[in-house]
Image (cartoon, rainbow, N blue to C red):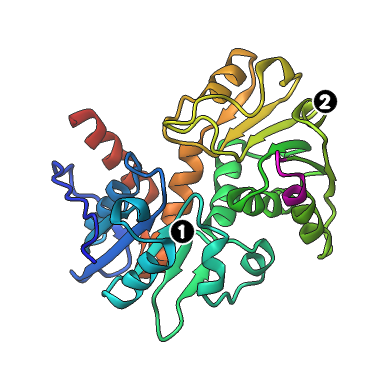
């Protein structure tokens, strides 16, 4: 199968570095997902590689465009020299049966967004979990989540739910149009000792009433899927909001929240931090985050 390869011909910003000794080496990476034509992952990983002296290629792999199913594309990556792949909507839960998970948080979450082909069995990780924690602490220094209303209990919702407990949330109110999925996430959270209380709300209005934080973990707002999981008139007096969607960054949810004076953490922040964690897993290198952000801004300005 010939993958849908992304060819990135980007101008070179000023050279700024990467932690550790660097030796030039080729690293083949990819992303499997359904709605990723505008994903910024290729640019980020290629640029992180440049900063670290690595020759990184990163391919968008859309199963329907390749006339294959998810498992076929995954097997192709496993057998074709990829160092690792990222997994995004709607395959983060489906991939779990194809990988070995060593860390307890990822095992409890039951979803993976990062796969490392290292040895006979692919290794699965969840950098959405670690990335959200890092992003929240960076965007809201010293803050606690408080009572959080979250729409969407799928793959990214699972990762963020467990992250919210680690960040000190007192209560998580889950709403999903598939109530059974929300109930299943509640059960998985309650299966381990946690201080955070979890309730399944019958609708988003009840979930959001009086909440300190609002979180969208549905695909609503993505390119091709307009709308908002939390209507503006249900945002109440929330103090902060987060939208997992980052393409586009200015979703209806984010714009409505800002208009009400709510501090918003964009989906780009989760995207950036989870990608930095994934890059470290793929390459063993710790890229300078400030340098990477500056290089990506420079590229966007030059485009």
Q: Earlier in the sequence, mark 2 or mark 1?
A: 2
Q: Classify mark 2: residues with Cα within 10 Å, few (<14), some (14-19) or many (20+).
A: some
Image check: 174 left or right of 45? right
Residue 295's disc number = none
Q: Please give the range of residues in magenta.
A: 176-182
- x and y, in percent, of residue 42 in the image: 29, 50
- x and y, in percent, of residue 157 in the image: 64, 48
> Residue placed at 46% from the left, 36% from the top?
246
Vertical order, 108 against 160 (above or below): below
Q: Classify mark 1: residues with Cα within 10 Å, few (<14), some (14-19) or many (20+).
A: many
| Label 2: which secondary element | loop
Residue 277's disc number = 1
Q: CA distance from mark 2 to mark 1?
A: 34 Å
| Label 1: which secondary element | helix
Say which of 227 and 265 sits in front. 227
Image check: 282 left or right of 186? left
- x and y, in percent, of residue 188 in the image: 77, 61
> Residue placed at 75% from the left, 29% from the top?
204
Position of the N terminus, as image quadrant, is: bottom left
> Residue placed at 71% from the left, 44% from the top?
178
Magenta span has 180?
A: yes
Q: In the displayed image of the protein, which residue is found farthest to the bottom?
A: 120
Image check: 104 left or right of 25? right
Vertical order, 114 against 265 (above or below): below
Using the rendered image of the protein, determine whether residue 83 is visible from the camera's viewpoint. Answer: no
Vertical order, 110 against 89 (above or below): below
- x and y, in percent, of residue 146 in the image: 78, 37
Which residue position holds label 2?
Answer: 210
């Amino acid at each position: 199968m010939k993958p849908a390869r992304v060819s990135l011909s980007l101008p070179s910003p000023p050279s700024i570095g990467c932690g550790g000794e660097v030796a030039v080496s080729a690293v083949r990476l990819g992303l499997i997902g359904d709605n990723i034509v505008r994903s910024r992952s290729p640019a980020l990983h290629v640029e992180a590689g440049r900063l670290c002296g690595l020759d990184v290629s990163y391919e968008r792999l859309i199963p329907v465009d390749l006339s294959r199913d998810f498992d076929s594309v995954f097997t192709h990556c496993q057998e074709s020299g990829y160092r690792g792949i990222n997994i995004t909507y709607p395959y983060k839960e489906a991939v779990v049966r194809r990988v070995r998970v060593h860390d307890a948080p990822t095992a409890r979450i039951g979803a993976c967004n990062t796969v490392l082909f290292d040895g006979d069995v692919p290794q699965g990780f969840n950098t959405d979990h670690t990335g959200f924690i890092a992003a929240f602490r960076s965007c809201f220094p010293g803050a606690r989540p408080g009572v959080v209303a979250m729409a969407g209990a799928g793959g990214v919702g699972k990762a963020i739910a467990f992250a919210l407990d680690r960040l000190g949330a007192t209560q998580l109110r889950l709403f999903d149009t598939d109530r059974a999925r929300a109930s299943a996430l509640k059960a998985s959270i309650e299966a381990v000792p946690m201080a955070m209380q979890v309730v399944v709300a019958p609708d988003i209005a009840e979930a959001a009433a009086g909440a300190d934080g609002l979180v969208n973990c549905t695909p609503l707002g993505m390119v091709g899927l307009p709308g908002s999981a939390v209507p503006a008139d249900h945002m109440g007096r929330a103090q902060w909001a987060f939208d997992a969607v980052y393409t586009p960054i200015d979703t209806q949810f984010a714009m409505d929240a800002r208009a009400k004076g709510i501090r918003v953490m964009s989906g780009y922040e989760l995207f950036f931090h989870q990608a930095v964690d994934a890059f470290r897993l793929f390459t063993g290198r710790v890229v300078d985050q400030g340098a990477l952000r500056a290089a990506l801004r420079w590229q966007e300005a030059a485009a």
